[in-house]
Image (cartoon, rainbow, N blue to C red):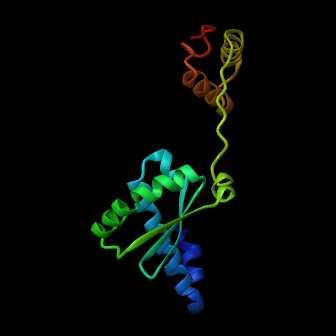
Amino acid sequence: MRPQRLARILSADGELQPLLAKADELRALSGLVHRFLSADLAGGARVVNFKDSQLALVATDSATAAKLKLLAPSLVRFLAEGRWQVNSVSVRVQPSSLRRAQPLRKDVEFSTPAMDALCKLHASMRPSPAREALGRLLRRRGARGPGSGESR
């Protein structure tokens, strides 16, 4: 949803009304499509257009595109239940468009000595936002009693 002040500014210009309406329409459709798809499939798909009852999607790779094409008839029925007049779904692959939009996820495993050192650091810190953040990190990583010096 657009911030209220920005919405007021944009809506003041009559020439932008069709653009704002289209953006709202695509945003609503995107939400429905992502609700329909599984989380991993939704992460690789994006609604790019809706025109003449045809919904256009972009997929990050050919495997995702193939799954989307198989799900297209079910998606059309799902959208029809929500009163959207979608007759067909087109899917194309555009690898770079979504890869940049997804946040980079890094999985890190800490060694036992590293966890011990972080627990000791947490225990030595004064109350602060940094100490709270370190405590959350230690709890997520399975440290028992952040600050106790014990690790998993």
Q: Nearer the viewer, residue 55 or 35?
A: 55
Q: Residue at x 46, y 56 (%)?
A: 68
Q: Position of residue 18 (x, y in %)?
A: 53, 86
Image quarter of residue 148:
top right
Location of residue 97 with respect to 87 vertically, above or below: above
Q: Residue at x 62, y 14 (%)?
A: 147
Location of residue 100 with respect to 136 vertically, above or below: below
Image quarter of residue 110:
top right
Question: Outermost residue toward the left?
Answer: 81
The number of discs equals 0
Q: Nearer the viewer, residue 43 or 64?
A: 64
Question: Outermost residue toward the bottom?
Answer: 14
Q: Position of residue 130 (x, y in %)?
A: 68, 31
Q: Would residue 80 appear left or right of 146 to someone viewing this image?
A: left
Q: Would residue 46 appear left or right of 79 to someone viewing this image?
A: right
Location of residue 32 with respect to 133 vertically, above or below: below
Q: Position of residue 84 (x, y in %)?
A: 35, 73
Image quarter of residue 123:
top right
Q: Position of residue 57 (x, y in %)?
A: 52, 65
Q: Nearer the viewer, residue 46 or 142?
A: 46
Q: Residue at x 57, y 11 (%)?
A: 152
Q: Would residue 62 appear left or right of 120 to someone viewing this image?
A: left
